[in-house]
Amino acid sequence: MTIAPYLREIGRGKDGARSLGREQAADLMARLLDGQVSDVETGAFAIAMRIKGETPEELAGFMDAVAPRLLPLPEPPASGAVVLPSYNGARKLPNLVPLLAMSLALEGLPVLVHGLEEDPGRVTTAAVFDALGLPPVRDAAGVAARWADGAPAFIATDDLHPSLARLLALRRVIGLRNPAHSLAKLLPALGARRNAVRVVNHTHPEYAVSLGEFLARTHATALLLRGTEGEPVADARRCPKLTAFLDGVEQPELSVPAQGGSLLSVPELPPATDAATTARYIRDVLAGAKPLPTPIATQMMALRALADAGRG
């Protein structure tokens, strides 16, 4: 089954390409996920979309195909849950996603983290969790067991959504991202429940607008922020703007403005970004030997407030 008609629409270059409607995008993505197209066509799709860029309408359509193919996971409790997508890893700054996840879990919120187990040249969240004695879980039973222990659960995309993971892996072949990278960070891994708060992060300011439109179109409950090196955790040195969405509607009273002015102090961070050093720092913070960076504490409060609002 060919996707040539869709490629003719999206593959005309930056200025000549036309965007797909939501139903068209859903049909196209379903064919890609179900392996109904050739490798050549899949590569053409990835390159065409990299040049054109995806619209919020296309992302919503793609997600219509992606979401039903997710691994079914346990229902979050009435108190809510938090979903953290981790797909970039640490480069220059320590990866503190596990610190955010474990701090939330200590407050009684179930946390699901999903992402890549390995990424050459970067320190993944999975590696830091492993150094903390929390290796990845592989299925719904593993998630439930980790939550029962009061700990966050990390599950690899290969287990959560194998067909989406295959699209993500294209980057290592052709050297370019494709819509799967955006979709992975937007996954409703615990379903569209209003008390399952997704953290959605972006790397460039212009994406805040398009991702906000996507969250509105899909009636999502989420906290949108500019992440730390593409990870869903507030920069430990300065808190970014935190924009809360409940059922797709922006909630100014639950949002937090970006921290302004000069930094009067900088938190003590790990001296290196490797997994072992980062894990030691996280243990010290959780034990009270080092302070929790204020921006991460602020993000935690925003997530708790949004989860509480989602119970209504």
Image: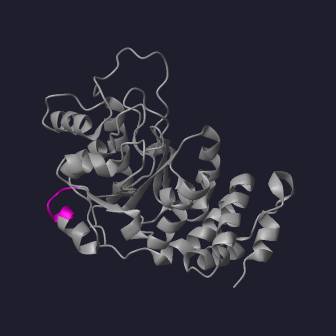
Q: Position of residue 257 (x, y in %)?
A: 49, 34
* Front residue (pair 195, 23): 23
285 vs 227, left or right, is: left
The answer to whether residue 246 is seen in the rendering is: no
Residue found farthest to the bottom: 1
Residue at image location 47% in from the left, 38% down from the top: 229
* Front residue (pair 285, 104): 285
Q: How many marks?
A: 0
Residue at image location 19% in from the left, 49% down from the top: 106
Look at the image and tell me in which quarter the N terminus lies. bottom right
* Front residue (pair 31, 249): 31
130 vs 118, left or right, is: left
Q: Position of residue 102 (x, y in %)?
A: 23, 48
* Magenta span: 146-151
The answer to whether residue 153 is seen in the rendering is: yes
Look at the image and tell me in which quarter the C terminus lies. bottom left
Residue at image location 53% in from the left, 72% down from the top: 66
Q: Quadrant of residue 12?
A: bottom right
Q: Quadrant of residue 111?
A: bottom left
Above or below: residue 251 compared with residue 218: above
Above or below: residue 248 compared with residue 102: below
